[in-house]
C-alpha cells in the first residue's frame, strides 16, 4: 500500500442528503426499539424483577425469634447486609451475638460449597473439553455411518438430567452394576472422593456430547485448504493440530467452554438426585445451588442472600472469562460499525 | 399492516407477562367463601399429598352425600414431602382462604402453629382426643396447645429372620439385639440396619437411638438436651456397631428402600423399618427366599412416630365445617376404611384390639406395642433447621465409624446441640 495509490476522496454528500440519512437512521433506530420493546419488557418482568426482589428480600430477616411466652414467631425486620456477612464469614447469630457457626449449620458450609462448586466446574469442563475435541474429530471424519454416530453421540445430551442422575444412581448403588463389574465395594454415593467422582463421571457422560457438537461446528468452519497447505509445507500432524486447528478453533472453543463453565457453576439436579449433596462428612457434594435450596427450607431471606452471592460469583467468572479469553459472545457489532465507518 | 403486526406482538407479550404474573401470585381463584350454610359453615377444600390408594375420593363421596350444603373438594399435592410443605407454606403466607383442612406431616405442626397458620383446636373448635393414642396426640401439640388432630400414624417395627434366630429370644432392646450378632456372622450376613443415609430417615434413627437409651434430643422449649450420659450412650451404641461391622458399611447409604432390598434378598438378620414392608415382602418377587423365614416384633426400644395430622387453616372461612370434617375423617368408621383401602394405621387405641381388624391385619398388635413406647421427633418451629443440623453432624460420625474411625461421640453431640441452637435463631 503506497500513499501514491490513494484514490481521491469522494465529495461529502450534500447537506440535505446527509440530513435525510440521519433522519432515516433515527427512524430505523426507533423501529428497532419498538420491535425490541416487547422482548425487553418481558425480560424485565421475568429476569430483572425476580433478581431485584431477591436482593431486596436478602436485606431482611423473616423473624427475630420465638416469643417465649406465646411460642409464636416475632416479626423480623431490616438487617442490612447481615445475611451476606453470615455467609461470607460463616457466622451465626446466637443469642443476639455474631459467632462462628457450629458444624452442621448451613452457613458453616459456605466456603466448602464454593470449593465443591468450582471443583466440579474445573474438572468436568476440562474433561469435557478434551474428550469433546476427540469426539468432534471422529465425527468430523468422512466414513460410512457418520450420521448414525453423530446421532448416537447426542443421546446422553438428549436425556433429561434428572433421568441421567437416576440411571447413574442405580449404576453407583453399593450393590449396583459398577461395583459388580469392577469387583469392588466402593460406596460411590457416600465416600468423599468416590461421590465427587461419581458426579464428575455422570456429568461428563452427559454433557460431553454438547461440547463435542459445538467443537464440531467450529471444526467445520476451518477450510480444508489450510490443511492442504500445511501438508504441502511438510507440517507434522502435531504441528498441524497446534498451529492450525487450535488457533482456528479457538473462538468456537472459548464460547463452548464459557457456556459449560457457567452451566457447571450452577449445577444442582445431578448431585441433588445422585447424592443429595452428601458424600464424605455429608457435604462432600453440596454445590452452592444445593445449599440455596436447603436454606430456603429454613429462611427465605438468608437463602436470597446466598443466591445473590452465587449469582455474583457466576457473573464474575463470566466477566473474567470474556475479558481474559476474549470470548466473543456479545457479537462485534460495535467493531463492525467502526470498520464500516472507517471505510466510508 | 406493519402497525397491526406490531400491535399484535406487543399485545401477545403483554398477555404473556400477565399470565406469568398471575402464576406468581398463586392460584388465588377458586373461592370457597360466600355461598353455603352461613356462619362459618359451607363448602370446604381438603388438601393432602398424593393418594395412590384412591381412598380419599371414596371418603369425600361419603361426606358429600351426607352434607350436601358443606361439600368438600379434594386437592392432592405431589407425593414429595418437600413439595407438599412448600405448597402449604405458600398458601398460608398469602393468607389464602382456599385451603380449609390440611394434612400435615407430624413434624410440620410446630412451625405452622408458631407462624399462626393453624386454628388452635380450643374453645369452639375443641376436639376430644381422649380416644386416641397418647404418643400420637402429642405430635399435634405445640406450646401446650392442640393444633392438629391425629389422622394416621406410623412407627417402626423390627423385622427379623426367625429361621436364623431359632430359640434365641427376640431382642427387646438395641443392646440385646447387638448381643446376638454372632448369629449373623455365622450365617455370613449383616446383622442390623436402619436408615442412615443423610435424609429425614437419619433424624428418625438418631431420635430412636437417643430416646431408646433414655435421653431426649430437645426439651419442651426446643432447647437441645444432648449433653447427657444417656444421649452419649445411645449414639455410642450405633457408632460402635458401625465400627465393628455389625451394621454393614453400606448402611450409610440406606434409605427405607435400600434396607428393604437388603433384608428381602437375605443380607440382613435384623432391620427396623415402617409397617409398609409387611405388604412388600408379601408381594415382591425378590422376597420369595425369606417370605416364610421372617417375623416382626415391636421396635427394640422407642420408635419415632410418623404419620399425618389434620389441621384447620387459620384463614379458612368455614372452620365449623372443617372441624366436622376432621371429626368425620378420624371417626372409627373412617379409620377402618383407611386401613382397609390404604393400610394407614389407625390412631384410636380401641382399634388395635378390635378383633375384626387384628384378624385381618395381625401386624396391628405388634404396631400397637411399638406405638405405646414411641416418642415424637423434636417438636420445634425450626424443624427444618434442626433436622439438617442433626443430619449433618450425625452422618459425619457414622460415615467415619463405618470406615473404621472412632468419632468422639461427646464432641459430635455437642456440635449437634450447638447447630440445633443456631438453627433455632431463625438465621
Image (cartoon, coloured by chain):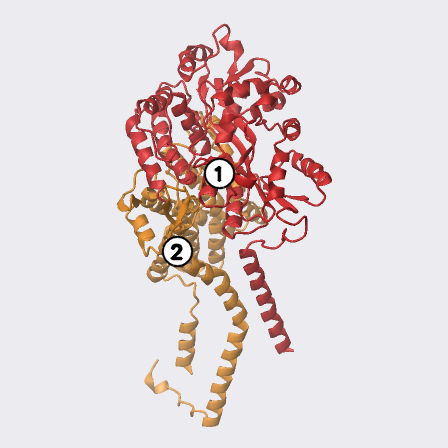
Residue at the disc numbered 2: A246
Q: Residue at x 51, y 75 (%)?
A: A33
Return the residue nearer the eye: B297 or B188. Answer: B297
Question: What color does chain B have in the rendering?
Answer: red
Does residue A272 appear in the picture of this structure?
yes
Q: Which residue ends up furthest to the front in the rendered image?
A: B123
Q: Is residue B3 above or below residue B91?
A: below
Does residue A223 appear in the picture of this structure?
no
Q: Residue at x 52, y 82 (%)?
A: A27
Question: What color does chain A have in the rendering?
Answer: orange
Nearer to us: label 1 or label 2? 1
Residue at the disc numbered 1: B109
Q: Is residue B85 left or right of residue A312?
A: right
* Residue B43: % across, % down: 66, 47
User: Badge 1 sits on which subunit?
Assistant: B
Return the residue nearer the eye: B180 or A195. Answer: B180
Return the residue nearer the eye: A278 or A145. Answer: A278
Amino acid at each position: 500500500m503506497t500513499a501514491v495509490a490513494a484514490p481521491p476522496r469522494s465529495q461529502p454528500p450534500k447537506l440535505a442528503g446527509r440530513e435525510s440519512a440521519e433522519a432515516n437512521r433515527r427512524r430505523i433506530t426507533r423501529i428497532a426499539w419498538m420491535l425490541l420493546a416487547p422482548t425487553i419488557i418481558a425480560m424485565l418482568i421475568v429476569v430483572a424483577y425476580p433478581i431485584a426482589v431477591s436482593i431486596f428480600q436478602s436485606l431482611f430477616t423473616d423473624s427475630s425469634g420465638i416469643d417465649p411466652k406465646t411460642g409464636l414467631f416475632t416479626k423480623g425486620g431490616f438487617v442490612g447486609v447481615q445475611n451476606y456477612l453470615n455467609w461470607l464469614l460463616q457466622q451465626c447469630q446466637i443469642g443476639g451475638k455474631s459467632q462462628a457457626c457450629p458444624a452442621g449449620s448451613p452457613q458453616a458450609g459456605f466456603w466448602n460449597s464454593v470449593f465443591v462448586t468450582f471443583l466440579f466446574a474445573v474438572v468436568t469442563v476440562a474433561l469435557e473439553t478434551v474428550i469433546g475435541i476427540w469426539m468432534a474429530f471422529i465425527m468430523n471424519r468422512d466414513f460410512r455411518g457418520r450420521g448414525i454416530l453423530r446421532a448416537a453421540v447426542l443421546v446422553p445430551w438428549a436425556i433429561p438430567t434428572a433421568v441421567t442422575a437416576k440411571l447413574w444412581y442405580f449404576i453407583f448403588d453399593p450393590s449396583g452394576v459398577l461395583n459388580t463389574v469392577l469387583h469392588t465395594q466402593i460406596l460411590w454415593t457416600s465416600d468423599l472422593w468416590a461421590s465427587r467422582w461419581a458426579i464428575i463421571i455422570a456429568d461428563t457422560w452427559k454433557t460431553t456430547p454438547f461440547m463435542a457438537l459445538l467443537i464440531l461446528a467450529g471444526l467445520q468452519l476451518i477450510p480444508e485448504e489450510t490443511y492442504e497447505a500445511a501438508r504441502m509445507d511438510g507440517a507434522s500432524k502435531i504441528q498441524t493440530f497446534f498451529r492450525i486447528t487450535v488457533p482456528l478453533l479457538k473462538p468456537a472453543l472459548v464460547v463452548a467452554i464459557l457456556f459449560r463453565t457457567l452451566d457447571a457453576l450452577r449445577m444442582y439436579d445431578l448431585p441433588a438426585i445422585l447424592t443429595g449433596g452428601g458424600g464424605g462428612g455429608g457435604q462432600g457434594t453440596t454445590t452452592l445451588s444445593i445449599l440455596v435450596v436447603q436454606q430456603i427450607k429454613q429462611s427465605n431471606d438468608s437463602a436470597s442472600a446466598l443466591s445473590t452471592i452465587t449469582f455474583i460469583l457466576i457473573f464474575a467468572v463470566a466477566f473474567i472469562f470474556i475479558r481474559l479469553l476474549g470470548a466473543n459472545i456479545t457479537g462485534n457489532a460495535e467493531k463492525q460499525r467502526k470498520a464500516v465507518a472507517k471505510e466510508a | 399492516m406493519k402497525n397491526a403486526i406490531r400491535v399484535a406482538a406487543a399485545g401477545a407479550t403483554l398477555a404473556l407477562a400477565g399470565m406469568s404474573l398471575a402464576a406468581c401470585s398463586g392460584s388465588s381463584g377458586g373461592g370457597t367463601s360466600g355461598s353455603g350454610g352461613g356462619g362459618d359453615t359451607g363448602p370446604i377444600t381438603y388438601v393432602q399429598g398424593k393418594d395412590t390408594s384412591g381412598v380419599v375420593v371414596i371418603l369425600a363421596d361419603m361426606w358429600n352425600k351426607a352434607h350436601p350444603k358443606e361439600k368438600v373438594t379434594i386437592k392432592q399435592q405431589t407425593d414429595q414431602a418437600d413439595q407438599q410443605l412448600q405448597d402449604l407454606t405458600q398458601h398460608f403466607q398469602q393468607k389464602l382462604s382456599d385451603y380449609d383442612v390440611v394434612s400435615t406431616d407430624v413434624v410440620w405442626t410446630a412451625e405452622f402453629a408458631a407462624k399462626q397458620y393453624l386454628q388452635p383446636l380450643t374453645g369452639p373448635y375443641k376436639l376430644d382426643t381422649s380416644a386416641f393414642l397418647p404418643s400420637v396426640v402429642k405430635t399435634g401439640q405445640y406450646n401446650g396447645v392442640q393444633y392438629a388432630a391425629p389422622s394416621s400414624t406410623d412407627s417402626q417395627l423390627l423385622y427379623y429372620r426367625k429361621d436364623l434366630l431359632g430359640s434365641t429370644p427376640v431382642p427387646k432392646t438395641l443392646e440385646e439385639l447387638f448381643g446376638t450378632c454372632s448369629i449373623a456372622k455365622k450365617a455370613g450376613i449383616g446383622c442390623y440396619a436402619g436408615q442412615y443415609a443423610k435424609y429425614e430417615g437419619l433424624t428418625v434413627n438418631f431420635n430412636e437411638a437417643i430416646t431408646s437409651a433414655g435421653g431426649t434430643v430437645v426439651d419442651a422449649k426446643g432447647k437441645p438436651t444432648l449433653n447427657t450420659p444417656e444421649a452419649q450412650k445411645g449414639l455410642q451404641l450405633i457408632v460402635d456397631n458401625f465400627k465393628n461391622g455389625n451394621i454393614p458399611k453400606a448402611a450409610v447409604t440406606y434409605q427405607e428402600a435400600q434396607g428393604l432390598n437388603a433384608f428381602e434378598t437375605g443380607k440382613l438378620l435384623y432391620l427396623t423399618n415402617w409397617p409398609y414392608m409387611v405388604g412388600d415382602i408379601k408381594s415382591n418377587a425378590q422376597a420369595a427366599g425369606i417370605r416364610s423365614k421372617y417375623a416382626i416384633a415391636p421396635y427394640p426400644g422407642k420408635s419415632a412416630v410418623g404419620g399425618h395430622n389434620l389441621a384447620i387453616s387459620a384463614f379458612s372461612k368455614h372452620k365449623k365445617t372443617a372441624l366436622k370434617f376432621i371429626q368425620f375423617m378420624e371417626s372409627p368408621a373412617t379409620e377402618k376404611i383407611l386401613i382397609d383401602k390404604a393400610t394407614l394405621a389407625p390412631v384410636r387405641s380401641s382399634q388395635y384390639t378390635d378383633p375384626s381388624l387384628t384378624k385381618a391385619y395381625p401386624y396391628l398388635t405388634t404396631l400397637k406395642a411399638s406405638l405405646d413406647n414411641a416418642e415424637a421427633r423434636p417438636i420445634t418451629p425450626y424443624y427444618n433447621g434442626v433436622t439438617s443440623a442433626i443430619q449433618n453432624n450425625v452422618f459425619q460420625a457414622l460415615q467415619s465409624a463405618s470406615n473404621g474411625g472412632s468419632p468422639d461421640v461427646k464432641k459430635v453431640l455437642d456440635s449437634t446441640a450447638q447447630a440445633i441452637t443456631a438453627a433455632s435463631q431463625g438465621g
